[in-house]
């Protein structure tokens, strides 16, 4: 009862109209602008691999199917990771693309590729350049 009397007395003084007007003004004038950027995941692996190779100064296509080299292993890991993140490829589709590798091998390479981005600025810069290219 006391609260109802209080709110009705506020209505009579015009304060409620001011409060209502300021709420409406704040609601209609404030615009939410998301700063999110989206990564398009439908790019062709050949295009991505070629561009990544240019950023790294290497021909990545040649080392993709070759094993047993430390640098080739890093490049395979990086390529696998970018195929997952930028091309939207599944482990199965990466297995088909690379050939002679299991889904577990692709998973391991993808994880190694992610670690490369965190630990090696060369790969991180190449990845960021690929993202910025759109």
Image (cartoon, grey):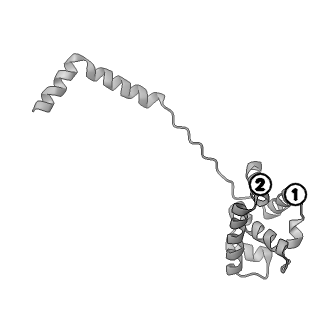
- Mark 2 lies on a secondary structure that is helix
Q: Which mark is residue 92?
A: none
User: Which of marks 2 and 1 precedes in the sequence?
Assistant: 1
Residue 102, picture quadrant: bottom right
Determine which of the numbered discs, if any, sits on residue 54 in the image: 1
Relative horizontal placement of residue 75, taking residue 25 as reference (left or right): right
Task: Give the residue furthest to the top.
Answer: 13
Task: Estimate the x, y position of residue 80 in percent, counting from the top left.
Answer: 74, 69
**To which quarter of the image does residue 68 belong?**
bottom right
Place of residue 119 in the rendered image (x, y in percent of width and height, measured from the top left): 71, 63
State left or right for residue 33 relative to residue 87: left
92 or 104: nearer the viewer: 104
Contact? badges 1 and 2 (CB < 8 Å): no
Asked if residue 90 is positioned above or below residue 22 in the image, the reply reads below
Residue 90 position in % (x across, y down) = 67, 70
Q: In the figure, 128 relative to 78: above or below?
A: above
Q: CA distance from mark 1 to mark 2?
A: 12 Å
Quarter occupied by the N terminus:
top left
* Pick the front one: 44 or 130: 130
Numbered disc 1: secondary structure: helix
Q: Residue at x 75, y 81 (%)?
A: 101
- Residue 36, visible in the rendered structure: yes
Q: Which mark is residue 125?
A: 2
Res 88 seen here: no
Q: Is residue 51 left or right of residue 134?
A: right
Does 13 appear above or below 32?
A: above
Q: How many marks?
A: 2
Give the x, y percent position of residue 33: 55, 38
Mark whose residue sits in front, 1 or 2: 2
Mark 2 closeness class: few <14, some 14–19, many ≥20 residues within 10 Å: some
Please tell me how crowded label 1 is: few (under 14), some (14-19), or many (20+) other residues with Cα within 10 Å.
few
């Amino acid at each position: 009862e006391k609260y109802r009397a209080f709110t009705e007395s506020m209505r009579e003084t015009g304060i409620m109209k001011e409060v209502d007007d300021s709420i409406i003004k704040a609601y209609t004038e404030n615009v939410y602008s998301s700063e999110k950027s989206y990564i398009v995941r439908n790019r062709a692996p050949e295009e991505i691999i070629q561009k990544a190779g240019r950023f790294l100064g290497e021909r990545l296509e040649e080392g993709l199917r070759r094993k047993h080299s430390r640098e080739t292993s890093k490049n395979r890991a990086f390529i696998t990771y970018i195929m997952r993140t930028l091309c939207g490829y599944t482990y199965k589709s990466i297995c088909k693309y690379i050939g002679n590798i299991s889904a577990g091998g692709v998973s391991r390479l993808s994880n190694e590729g992610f670690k490369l981005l965190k630990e090696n600025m060369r790969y991180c810069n190449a990845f960021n350049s690929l993202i910025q290219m759109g």
